[in-house]
Amino acid sequence: MKKYFIVFLLLGIISYPVSSIELDASIDDEIRRTYDPSKLEQSLPALPKTTPSQPQIQTKTVTSSPKSNSNSSLPPKALPVESPASPQLGVKKLPNDYKYDKSTAIRIKKGTKFRVKSNSVISDYLKEGSVVSFTSLEPVTQRYITIPQGTKFTAVVQDSHMPQYSGNGGLVVLLVNGITINGQTRRIQGKITKANYKKIFLNNIKGKRSYLSGIAKQVDKGENFYKKTRRTSSKLADNPVGVIISPIPTIAGMLVYAVNFVGSPVFAIWSKGGRISIPAGSEFEIKLLEDAYLE
């Protein structure tokens, strides 16, 4: 039974495409009988006639023109606006600053010394920021240049103070910051190494310190008072009545001398140091702290 069923199924499968082909052919015959192809072509509407004045290229330009108009109507893109450079705060432009080429400029070596004289009084009365000037006393020869006699130097007061307690003397600190050669001023950096033939250390022109001398003065005061009391006691001893009280002045003198001797380090704190007052025309020595370049 299974064999007959399988054979029947295979015959059905094989005959199915044939029936479908026949069905498709019958449909085509029915369409031909219902619709006449010649009448169908006559019933179609006529195509529009094109004029030679309107070529296909022109239609393309017409269709593309709205795009160009739309693009032209758009505003141009704004370029980025750069903000103006803000000024640098804290940078001070000095009037004598100048640019130079080190390969062509003339160099004055670091450590060069100049003998100069002061054009004004140098004292501890000068305030911070005050400017003083000097004039060179002799020419100084360097490679390719000779700094002539009479060259002007300027210096600014960096620090100063009057004599202070504890025996501290006056103070003046000068920074040499300018040189004038042939009418042209250039910035330099230098310090004072000698003032009035005395060596200056760390660029500090100091008044004489008097703390130790103040201690000696206190001891001398006690000793002088003791000597006076000794003379007084000797005079009293010559008198029969005064011989009784003659030891009293000597004892008082010894006490004062002992107090001054022991307390002299404390008493010397209230002593002041020496003043600074170097007259105009005094000799100084200037030493460059770095190379200087001249055009």
Image: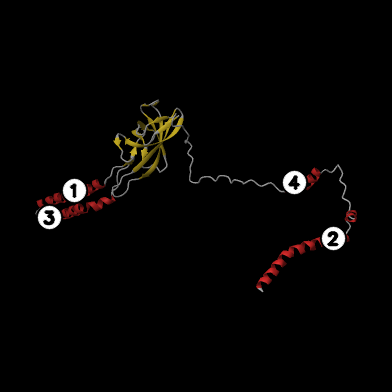
Q: Amino acid at mark 4?
A: Ser
Location of residue 19 (image quadrant): bottom right
Which is in the foreground here, disc 1 or disc 4? Answer: 4
User: Quarter of the image containing the N terminus?
Assistant: bottom right
Please give left or right for residue 177 compared with residue 44 in the image. Answer: left
Q: Nearer the viewer, residue 142 or 31?
A: 31
Q: Earlier in the sequence, mark 1 or mark 4?
A: 4
How many neighbours does mark 4 have within 10 angstroms: few (below 14), some (14-19), or many (20 or more)?
Answer: few
Q: Residue at point 25% right, 53% down?
A: 266
**Looking at the image, is 139 positioned above or below residue 91?**
above
Q: Earlier in the sequence, mark 3 or mark 2?
A: 2
Which is in the foreground here, disc 3 or disc 2? Answer: 2
| Pointer 1 residue | 224
| Pointer 4 residue | 68
Q: Amino acid at mark 1?
A: Asn
Q: CA distance from mark 1 to mark 4?
A: 116 Å
Q: Nearer the viewer, residue 27 or 243?
A: 27
Q: CA distance from mark 3 to mark 2?
A: 173 Å
Q: Amino acid at mark 3?
A: Pro
Q: Nearer the viewer, residue 287 or 209?
A: 287
Q: CA distance from mark 4 to mark 3?
A: 130 Å
| Pointer 2 residue | 29
